[in-house]
Image (cartoon, grey):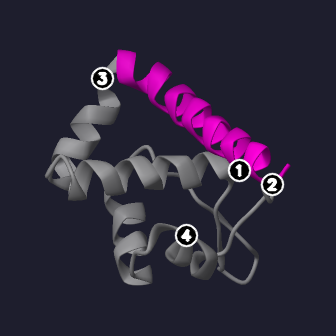
Amino acid sequence: MNKNYYNIDEISQILDEQKHTIRFWENRIRKLKVLRTHSGHRLYNYENLLLLKKIKELVDVEKLTLDGVNDYFSNSKVKKNTLNDNVISELRDLLGLLKKSN
């Protein structure tokens, strides 16, 4: 089951990425909108997590620059389908884990 919100430590562990890199992406990627608590702590929802996974893939695997990532997300077709594809992939992973546990 997914949590409603993740802190930056949890996101860093899930993505296996440094916290400063995630904060840098937050400043440079226009599509990534992160909630802040009244004390300034970052809170990431599940959509943010999926988006960060996609950003990591685009940077590490596809070798896009952050400007390239912004261009990728500004493409209207990608905007609509990327998160849906990620949700489907995550659901398939969860289904596989559930099948293994039974």
Q: Earlier in the sequence, mark 3 or mark 1?
A: 3
User: In this orientation, does residue 12 appear?
Assistant: yes
According to the picture, the residue beneath numbered tag 1 turns out to be 97
Residue denoted by label 2: 101
Asked whether the beta carbons under mark 2 and mark 1 sit within 8 Å of each other, the answer is: yes
Q: Nearer the viewer, residue 92 or 62?
A: 92
User: Reading the chain from its start, which is encountered first: label 3 or label 2?
Assistant: 3
Residue that badge 3 annotates: 75
Closer to viewer: mark 3 or mark 2: 2
- Residue 56 pos. (x, y %): 34, 57
Mark 4 and mark 1 in contact? Answer it, CB < 8 Å.
Answer: no
Q: Earlier in the sequence, mark 2 or mark 4?
A: 4
Compare residues 68 and 37 and report the one nearer the observer: 68
Which SS type dominates the magenta stretch? helix
- Read off the residue under disc 4: 14
- Please tell me whether residue 13 belongs to the stretch shown in magenta: no
Instruction: Identify the image quadrant of residue 92.
Output: top right
Label 4 and label 1: CA atoms lie apart by: 17 Å
- Would you call the spot at circle 1 few (<14 residues within 10 Å), some (14-19), or many (20 or more)? few
